[in-house]
Image (cartoon, coloured by chain):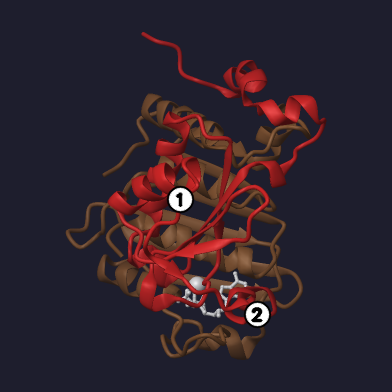
Chain colours: A brown, B red
Amino acid sequence: MKDLTMHIVDIVQNSVRAEAENVVLAIEIGEEMLSIKIIDDGCGMDAETLEKVTDPFYTSRTTRKVGLGIPLMKQNAELTGGEVKIASIVGEGTEFEATFGLTHWDRPPMGNLPETVAMTMTGNPSVNLMFSCSKGEASFAVSTAEVKEILGDDVNISQPKITSFLKDMIAENLKELEMIID
Amino acid sequence: MTKVKSLADLKKMKEDLQSKVNLREKGDNVERMVQVKVSMATCGIAAGAKEVMNQLITELDNRSVDAVVTQTGCMGYCHAEPTIEVTLPNNDPVVFGHVDDKKVVEIIEQYIIAGKLVDGVIPVNYETVKEHKNK
Ligand SMILES: Nc1ncnc2c1ncn2[C@@H]1O[C@H](COP(=O)(O)OP(=O)(O)OP(=O)(O)O)[C@@H](O)[C@H]1O
Ligand SMILES: [Mg+2]
C-alpha cells in the first residue's frame, strides 16, 4: 500500500462487507500522532475472530486464503511508532483505530484524502459515511445523510458530477483549515 | 480570496444533476443509467483500483455520461485486478480485468459510448461474484 488513503478505503470496505449502516471515519491530526478511526455498526466479530484479524492467514472469505487488509496497516502503523487497536462486539459493530507517528520517516504519505472521502461516500451509497477531520480546535465534517438530504430522492448520489463536487468541496475546506498533510 | 465551497453549492447544482431520463420519469431510475462497479478489496486497491475509480469518475464527468459509479467487494478475480463491472442499460453486466488508465478511456469511448466490445472481458462466474454477499 503506497499511502494511507489506500488503507482507509480498504478498512471501510470491511465495514461495508459487515453490512454496516453507519460508518464513522474520523481523522485527527495531533502534535505528534496521526489517528485514523473507523467505527461501524456492522455485524461485529467474536473474540476468537478478533484475535485472528491481525494474522494475514486469517480471512472469512471463501474465494482466497489470505486477508491482508488489517495486517498490512498494522505493520505500517507499528513501523512509525504507532499501533492498531480493534474492539468489536458481535451484533453491535467494530471500532478500529490506527495511529501513526506524524513526522516519522517511515510514515507512508497520506495520499489524496478529499478524493478518497468523496469516492468512499458516493461509491457506497447504502452506507451513511460520517467523515470528520480535526486538528486542535479546528474541524471539518460531512456525511452521506447531509448530502442525500440536499439531493432528495430523485438524484442518485453515485453520479460522477457529485463525486467531483464533493472532492473539490472537501479539498477546499481542508486546505482552508490547513489540514492537508503529505 | 475565493469562497470555499459548501453543501449549499451542491443545492444549486441539483437541477443539472437530475438526469434527462429522470426528468421524464420521476424517481431515481438506475436501470436507465450506465452502472459501473469497481472491485475495492485489498487485492484490487493494491493493484490500483482507487486510481481507476478516480479516473473513471473524471472521464465520465468530462464526457457528461449519465452514469453511477460504485464500489464493490472482492469479485473473486484477484489475478486480474483492478477489475470493473459495467452494465449498459438493458444489457447484462460485463467484467473487465487488468484495467489501467488506457483501458479506462477505451472502455468509456468504445464500450460505454459506442457500444462496441473491447478486449479484456472476463467470462463471468456468478457464484464468485456473489461471494461477498453470503459471508
Ligand atoms: N469491520 C468489521 N466488521 C466485522 N468483521 C470484520 C471487520 N473487519 C474485519 N473483519 C473480519 O476480519 C477478517 C480479516 O479482515 P482483513 O481486512 O484483514 O481481510 P479480508 O477483508 O478478509 O480480506 P482483504 O482485506 O484482503 O480483502 C475479515 O474477513 C472479517 O471476517
Ligand atoms: Mg479487508
x then y, percent, for residue B99: 36, 59
- Label 2 and label 1: CA atoms lie apart by 45 Å
Question: Looking at the image, in which quadrant does ligand 1 appear?
Answer: bottom right
Numbered mark located on residue B39 in the image: none
Q: Can residue A135 be seen in the rendering of this structure? A: no
Residue type indicated by callout 1: Lys
- Which residue, given by chain and number where applicable, does mark 1 sit on? B116
Question: Which image quarter is the C terminus of chain A in?
Answer: top left
Question: Which image quarter is the N terminus of chain A in?
Answer: bottom left
Task: Identify which residue, A138 or B71, lies in the foreground.
Answer: B71
x then y, percent, for residue A93: 69, 68
Residue type indicated by callout 2: Met
Residue behind label 2 places its C-beta within 8 angstroms of ligand 1: yes
Task: Confirm whether circles 2 and 1 share one chain.
Answer: no
Extreme-front residue of the structure: B116
Residue density around tag 2, few if under 14, some if 14–19, many if 20 or more, within 10 Å: some
Q: Residue at x 62, y 69 (%)?
A: A17
- Establish if B58 lies above or below A100: above
User: What chain letter is assigned to the residue under label 1?
Assistant: B
Extreme-right residue of the structure: B26
Left or right: residue A100 compared with residue A11? left
**Mark 2, secondary structure of its residue:** loop
User: What chain letter is assigned to the residue under label 2?
Assistant: A
Q: Can residue B35 be seen in the rendering of this structure? A: yes
- Establish if A36 lies above or below B32: below
Task: Identify which residue, B68 or A122, lies in the foreground.
Answer: B68
- Establish if A162 lies above or below B85: above
**Mark 1, secondary structure of its residue:** loop
x then y, percent, for residue A99: 39, 61
Left or right: residue A19 compared with residue B73? right
- Which residue, given by chain and number where applicable, does mark 2 sit on? A45
x then y, percent, for residue A165: 50, 29
